[in-house]
Image (spheres, rainbow, N blue to C red):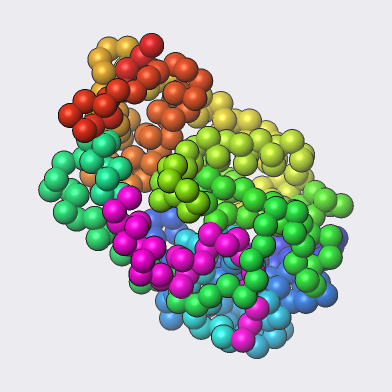
Amino acid sequence: MQEVLASPCEIHCISLPTPFPVGDVNVHLVKSEKLTLVDAGVKTIEAWNHFKNELAKLGYTPEDIDQVVITHHHPDHVGMLDYLSPELPVYGHRFNQPWITKNSSFFEHHDQFFYDLFSKLGVDGIILQKMNKLRKTLAYSCERSLSYEVKEGDTIPGLPGWTVLETPGHAQSHIALYHEGSRVLLGGDLLLGHISSNPLLEPPMDGEERPKTLLQYNESLRIIRDLQVKKVYPGHGNVIENASALITERLHKQEKRAEIVVDMLKEEPLTALQVCQKLFPLVYKKELVLTLSETLGQLDYLMEDDYIKMETVDGQWVFKTR
């Protein structure tokens, strides 16, 4: 798949295979003052060979790339950093750092966070003993450091006209690159055309408060909608031309799912796991982190708007309507 944008610069989309259910991941080669790779695929030889072949069709080799920008730390967006030159500058949000360097103390904190949180959500001890599976996808990630940290409003050298937007929710490290003149967004996994992006649970990076990822994600979507973005180059799937309408549709669907949760809690108080089992009866065991992330997001949303309340009973969070 290839898209070429006449203005503000050339953007080539290269789709790479992944071993994950989401399927192929998009990386974007931006030809401007510097040849910039936005996101770096997954760490497999198959993806790397495919990447080199697609680069060759465009007249480039990996050695021609001047710099890399990563939209977030997930393995399918950073893995091939290990195959690129270690001298290549890498830009990203500072929250990428412990993930992509595989910081051992961070992952001790990570595992303890999920063990404590899942206990409160109603997950039983047998499942809790399998918590090491939470990190199994890191085999497809990288082990290197950012060269430069970026934040909201920053610019990237060699990419004139592009501005960094902080867009947390799907990941705490998530950024997008926005070109105001043409209202084009290099969006990572912020907005996908064919599926909704998951606001994933993560341990807190600053302080002790758990990130409320669905609330963050909704706010990030509203920011993009308010900018009236014309075109989004996403991390998966096809280019999005109708971003504002799609965002409005996604926010509406999220409200409808929240209404379903309220109706459940009107019948009886439930733990987060019990709500999850009702929302995702066929897949919650296989995709516990994904489905609990979605479930807790809905509960956070409803508590934020004061539709429900939470009580702690025998160490577990129990949710009920007001």
**Relative to 214, residue 257 above or below:** above
User: Can residue 270 be spotted in the picture?
Assistant: yes
Task: Tell whether 116 sits left or right of 47.
Answer: left
**Relative to 291, residue 233 above or below:** below
Residue 19, quarter of picture: bottom left
Residue 89, quarter of picture: bottom right
Magenta range:
87-113
The percent position of residue 270, horizontal first and vertical second, equals: 26, 23
- Residue furthest front as drawn: 207
**Relative to 21, residue 318 above or below:** above
Instruction: State yes or no: residue 107 in magenta.
Output: yes
The percent position of residue 267, horizontal first and vertical second, equals: 27, 12
Q: How many marks?
A: 0
User: Can residue 281 be spotted in the picture?
Assistant: no
- Residue furthest left as drawn: 126
Task: Tell whether 250 sits left or right of 157.
Answer: left
**Residue at left offset 80%, top offset 49%:** 183
